[in-house]
Amino acid sequence: MLAGIPAHAASYLTRCPGANGEPALSVEATARVGCKTTALPVDAGAVLAVVPAPRRPAGAPPPETITLSGSQGKSGFLMREVAMTPLSLNAPPPYLVPGVDFRAVATIGVIGPIGRATIGEDGDDTVLDCTPGTERAGLGFATTRMPPIPGMMIHVIHVAEDTFRLVVSNPGAPSSQDPRLLAKLKPADSATEAHIPLPADLAADTPLDFAVLCPAAGGRLSLSEISLEAKTAVPTDRAAWIRRDATWQNEAAQVFSRAQRWGLTQLAIHVPTSAGTVADPQALAGFVSAASARGIAVWALAADDGARITAADIGEALADYNGAVSPEAKVQGVEVELRPSDLWSYVADPETVALGFISRLERLKPSLGVPLGAVVPAWFPTTPSVADRLAAAVDRMTVVTDRTDPIDIRRAVARFLAWGTRHSRRVEAALEAGPVADGERGAFVRAEAGELWLVPVGGESALILLKEPARSLPGIAFRQDDVTPVPAASRSFLGRRAELRETLAPLGRTLGAWPSFSGFAFHGLFADHE
């Protein structure tokens, strides 16, 4: 019997040293020597999933609600996302997105003394009713950030009984400081458009509070639309991945036929190496030359396994290969995917994972002699501790959005496009076209007993998801309050290629407002060949 472990425990939550220093969590029938252990009064077979809890700031209060997203797998529930309220970390305010209504990004609320202003809805319109008065009051948007895009305007469609003022302020400024006037929304009996240029000195990337203020005489404003406008340039670059060697080696005709139908300008292919050299340079040269003749650039696709870049000798191998072939047969770059266990699954400490990935890219880059790209998930951080190092390590980034709704896609890539704009790096939005599983999103609230528990182990916390509600675990219980299906169609365009095609043009026009947006990539476009 291990010291400190009671004899009546039905199972043990263990936290053991994992690969590359990352902890490995499990619930097992017996305790492991050399691991941090917490005794549990439930059988190991009752556990659907166990994952590290998201990191929280020191002194942060315990969460009141937890939301889990994922899907059922052969070995239990596969976690994809975990969100805690209060927030696990101090997340920055979201970016306003060109072409997206403010109301889809920032919640709205009443500002001013009680009774001076009220907010209602009339169909899709937001209605602001104001009583007469001199106090500052009106409709306020939750704090957001302005994207670093030059020459933007605010597009407003409204009906108004009097003149309302659109203003902006810095939430950190003294409360006595007057907000900055952006425009006066003039009285209008029918829907009226206004295109309001933003001041050139309005700071990008910093928190801002936008509001619509009531006139002294009171009155009603009906707001149909308020959104950012920006000049847009739609790039034509389109890329796809091919992971299986046999696909490009033996099925090149089918690959090029599909590439033509989708207007592909780049293919990232797995290049087999042996003893630090390209395994079959003649086959590679033939394929790359055929692609070049069709206006398609070929990049080498590598994977990150968490310890090193798979085929870490790819740099030396490609340098030797490129030095020995004609220009049209040269591989144009290397694209590295974050390891699949992190790309598609929940990560408790995104910043640590990101910095480890960047460190491995930094070691790879000097040997390449060609541009280096990174493929990352939508959760990948762009915080100051990550942003500059990432920009120094890579020449471009591809963001796997894992979404099909255009609004969700725009939200997912906005901060990456802001990063790319600030650092002059190209950013692609990757859309899923391969098979994914149906999933679900469950909301859990604090309770005396529940299916979800926040349990301490080895100085950290873990989340344990059970098949049935339980009591008396050593931690905080959460009961399931709601569950929502997450259909595969919300994540992948598989079987809906026509819908994918229809999405590209309007989405490209919106994302094209960002100087860094370089086009789309298709994940799983060749899945039927894999």
Image: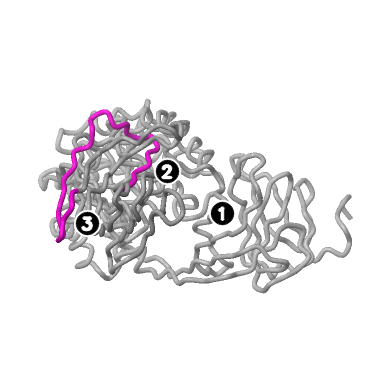
Which quadrant of the view contains residue 59?
top right
- Residue at which label 3 appears: 161
Nearer the observer, 137 or 272? 137
Residues at marks 2 and 1 touching, judged by CB atoms closer than 8 Å? no
Nearer the observer, 7 or 280? 7
- Secondary element under disc 1, as helix, strand or loop, is strand
Please identify the quadrant where the N terminus is shown.
Answer: bottom right
Q: Residues within 10 Å of mark 3 (few under 14, many from 20)?
A: some
Figure coloring: one colour
171 relative to 472 in the view: left or right: left
The location of residue 279, given as percent across then percent down, is 33, 42
Q: Nearer the viewer, mark 1 or mark 3?
A: 3
Residues at marks 1 and 3 touching, judged by CB atoms closer than 8 Å? no
Q: CA distance from mark 2 to mark 3?
A: 33 Å
Q: Residue at x 43, y 68 (%)?
A: 486
Q: Nearer the viewer, mark 2 or mark 3?
A: 3
- Residue at which label 1 appears: 85
Q: Which comes before the other along the chain, label 2 or label 3?
A: 2
Q: Which comes before the other along the chain, label 1 or label 3?
A: 1
Which quadrant of the view contains residue 321?
top left
Q: CA distance from mark 1 to mark 3?
A: 40 Å
Q: Residue at x 27, y 63 (%)?
A: 125
- Residue at which label 2 appears: 93
The three-letter amino acid code for the residue at tag 1 is Thr
Task: Give the residues in magenta.
Answer: 186-212
- Position of 292 relative to 368 (above/below): below
The three-letter amino acid code for the residue at tag 2 is Pro
The location of residue 377, given as percent across then percent down, is 41, 49
Residue at the extreme top:
366
